[in-house]
Image (cartoon, rainbow, N blue to C red):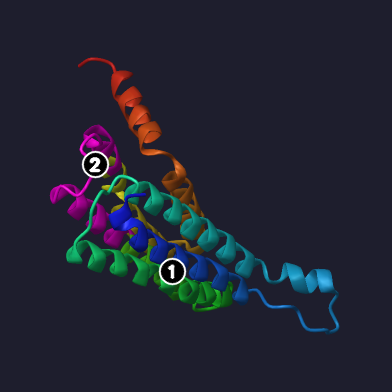
């Protein structure tokens, strides 16, 4: 971590920690009733799915945020503003998580899933804007040129993938949630691994 960006990353870490902690508040303790505790717990499966997906997303986003700022050597006011825009999206995540957990098996599940996935469209756009600004303004370490290209290549399609989840939610709510979780796992891949797989796929194509 560079001295100039230490406070930025420290503040960001606090926001990530609070947002990821708030997610658990959506999972309620079942009240006593005629049904057994096991049945009551199993009925809350939408809350578990929403919690796991959002927890994984915020956690992996925090990892990628750390990876990004380990390459940034200095910051300016615009970079700070873009980082706050990203954190705005992070702090919002517990709300659509609660909404989709409440409505995933109800008549409004379609709109709940659209809201949930649209939140990640916003966050991915903010993350990409932050990274591309740092690259275009020369705020990165001088020896990360190839690494920067790998990151740019990996995140370029992410907003479109989440936009695809928004569209999919209109037709298949549960499918959109599973694809969302799959995209989260995609984010966990280091940029070098993704780049190597893309290159390997291209090299394996038969010559025209």
**Residue corresponding to mark 1:** 116
Mark 1 or mark 2, whichever is nearer to me: 2
What kind of element bears circle 2?
A: loop
Residue at 58% across, 65% down: 51
139 left or right, relative to 201: left
Q: What is the quadrant of residue 144 in the picture?
A: top left
23 left or right, relative to 10: right
Magenta residue span: 124-151
Mark 1 closeness class: few <14, some 14–19, many ≥20 residues within 10 Å: many
Q: Is residue 111 magenta?
A: no
Mark 2 closeness class: few <14, some 14–19, many ≥20 residues within 10 Å: some
Of the numbered discs 1 and 2, the one sitting upstream in the chain is 1
Q: How many marks?
A: 2
28 left or right, relative to 6: right
Quarter of the picture holding the C terminus: top left
- Residue 78's x, y, as percent? 18, 65
Q: Is residue 144 magenta?
A: yes
Q: CA distance from mark 1 to mark 2?
A: 35 Å
Residue ranking furthest to the left: 137
- Residue 75's x, y, as percent? 22, 58
- Residue 9's x, y, as percent? 38, 59
Residue at 36% across, 49% down: 1
Nearest to the observer: residue 78 or residue 168: 78
- 115 to 208, vertically: above or below: below
Q: What is the quadrant of residue 84 in the picture?
A: bottom left
**Residue corresponding to mark 2:** 141
- 80 to 73, vertically: above or below: below
Residue at 25% across, 65% down: 80
Residue at 31% across, 42% down: 154
- Main SS of the magenta part reads helix
């Amino acid at each position: 971590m560079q001295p100039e960006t230490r406070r930025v990353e420290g503040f960001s870490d606090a926001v990530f920690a609070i947002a990821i902690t708030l997610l658990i508040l959506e999972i309620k303790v079942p009240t006593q009733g005629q049904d057994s505790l096991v049945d009551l717990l199993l009925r809350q499966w939408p809350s578990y799915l929403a919690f796991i997906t959002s927890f994984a997303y915020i956690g992996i986003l925090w990892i990628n945020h750390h990876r990004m700022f380990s390459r940034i050597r200095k910051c300016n006011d615009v970079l700070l503003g873009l980082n706050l825009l990203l954190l705005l999206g992070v702090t919002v995540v517990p709300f659509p998580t609660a909404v989709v957990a409440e409505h995933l098996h109800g008549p409004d599940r379609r709109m709940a899933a659209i809201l949930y996935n649209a939140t990640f469209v916003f966050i991915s756009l903010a993350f990409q804007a932050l990274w591309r600004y740092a690259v275009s303004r020369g705020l990165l370490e001088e020896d990360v040129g190839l690494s920067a290209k790998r990151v740019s290549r990996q995140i370029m399609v992410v907003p479109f993938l989440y936009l695809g989840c928004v569209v999919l939610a209109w037709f298949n709510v549960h499918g959109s949630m599973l694809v969302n979780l799959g995209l989260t796992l995609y984010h966990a891949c280091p940029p070098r691994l993704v780049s190597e797989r893309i290159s390997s796929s291209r090299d394996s194509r038969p010559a025209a």
